[in-house]
Image (cartoon, helix red, strand yellow):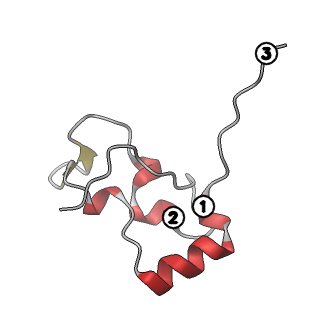
Amino acid sequence: MKRRLVDPPSPQNDPRFQEERAKFGFVVGCERCVYFVHRTGGCAHRYPNEQHKVGAFERDATPAGSFCKEFELD
């Protein structure tokens, strides 16, 4: 029997994530990553990044936020 892969739930609607994000000042989103190209708003590695931008982590944002495996702080 094959197992179906399911995307994990987005943290955007997790009350604990939102509380800790505000309390501890979590830095999430492409705009703070060293691979973010400010001139174009894209990723230097050409990954699609709409789900990784800061606004995607706001409650009920569309598309829902998800973490990028390449995220690196400036």
Residue 5 sits above or below residue 48 on the image: above
- The amino acid beneath tag 3 is Lys
Q: Secondary structure at mark 1?
A: helix
Rendered residue at 41%/73% (across/down): 26
Q: Earlier in the sequence, mark 1 or mark 2?
A: 1
Q: Disc 1 to disc 3, how far (Cα)? A: 27 Å
Given residues 26 and 43, the one toward you in this image is: 26
Residue 48 sits above or below residue 29 on the image: above
Residue 71 sits above or below residue 45 on the image: below
Q: Residue furthest left?
A: 39
Q: Dot 2: few (<14), some (14–19), or many (≥20) neighbours within 10 Å?
A: many
The C terminus lies in which quarter of the figure? Answer: bottom left
- The amino acid beneath tag 1 is Pro
Given residues 60 and 17, the one toward you in this image is: 17
- The amino acid beneath tag 2 is Phe
Query: Which residue has dot 3 on it?
Result: 2
Residue 17 sits above or below residue 4 on the image: below
**Left or right: where 30 falls relative to 35:** right
Q: Which mark, residue 57?
A: 2
Q: Secondary structure at mark 2?
A: helix
Query: Which residue has dot 1 on it?
Result: 11
Q: Residue furthest right?
A: 1
Name the mark nearer the viewer: 1 or 2: 1
Q: Disc 1 to disc 2, how far (Cα)? A: 7 Å
> Decide: marks 1, 2 in contact (CB < 8 A)?
yes
Q: Position of residue 33 (x, y in %)?
A: 25, 56
